[in-house]
Image: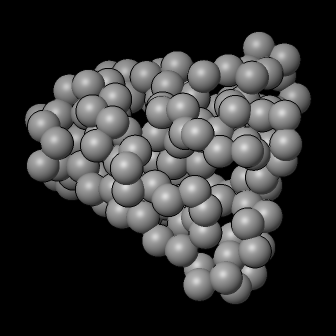
């Protein structure tokens, strides 16, 4: 049996925060605003995984009203969700994702993101796609006010 999930996240860019995407620190003058480290890619993947399992969303599982999640490294949250997948006897068949940012350019960081995420998921890199897009200077992302991410996850019962 297969299960598919769709995830999405967006965070506002702000000064005084580190920019962390896909578990990788990215050199930029601004970071993403959020209760956790605001890693949009990981948050989109988490929502896709939870959606595939019909387990609600990231905000329900890790509420921004709980101080335990304040500034938490999103890879910790991702590992918790991945353990739910394993507990329910599923494996990740593949993940497809987009990071949408006008700046900074994501392509130089994608190999490291894949390395970090594939290690957590215990999958080969040919099962994880991370693509970089811009919004051609349109909307909040295009005007460098925010960064967003989308993800689709396919799980297979073992």
Q: Residue at x 33, y 36 (%)?
A: 112
- Point out residue 145 in the picture as x, y percentages from the top left corner: 79, 64
* Quarter placement of the C terminus: top left
Q: Residue at x 50, y 59 (%)?
A: 105
Q: Is residue 101 left or right of residue 131?
A: right
| Residue in the foreground of this view, choosing between 141 and 149 | 141
Which quadrant of the view contains residue 151?
bottom left
Q: Residue at x 60, y 22 (%)?
A: 73
Label tally: 0
| Residue in the foreground of this view, choosing between 131 and 151 | 131
Q: Residue at x 51, y 48 (%)?
A: 41
Q: Image height check: is 135 above or below 39?
A: below
Q: Is residue 40 left or right of residue 29?
A: left
Q: Is residue 11 left or right of residue 93?
A: right
Which quadrant of the view contains residue 89?
top left
Q: Is residue 134 left or right of residue 36?
A: left
- Point out residue 85 in the picture as x, y percentages from the top left corner: 34, 32
Residue 156 visible somewhere in the drawing? no
- Point out residue 10 in the picture as x, y percentages from the top left corner: 68, 58
Residue 137 visible somewhere in the drawing? yes
Q: Image height check: is 78 above or below 148?
A: above
Q: Image height check: is 100 above or below 158?
A: below
- Point out residue 36 in the picture as x, y percentages from the top left corner: 72, 30
User: Which color scheme is applied?
Assistant: one colour
């Amino acid at each position: 049996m297969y299960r598919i999930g769709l995830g999405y996240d967006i965070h506002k860019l702000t000064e005084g925060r580190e920019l962390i995407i896909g578990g990788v620190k990215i050199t930029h003058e601004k970071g993403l605003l959020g209760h956790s480290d605001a890693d949009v890619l990981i948050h989109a993947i988490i929502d896709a995984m939870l959606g595939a399992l019909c387990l609600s969303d990231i905000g329900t599982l890790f509420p921004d009203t709980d101080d335990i999640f304040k500034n938490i490294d999103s890879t910790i949250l991702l590992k918790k969700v991945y353990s739910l997948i394993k507990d329910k006897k599923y494996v990740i068949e593949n993940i497809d994702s987009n990071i949408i940012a006008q700046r900074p350019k994501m392509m130089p960081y994608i190999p490291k993101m894949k390395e970090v995420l594939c290690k957590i998921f215990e999958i080969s890199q040919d099962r994880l796609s991370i693509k970089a897009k811009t919004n051609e200077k349109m909307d909040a992302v295009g005007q460098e006010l925010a960064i967003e991410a989308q993800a689709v996850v396919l799980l297979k019962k073992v």
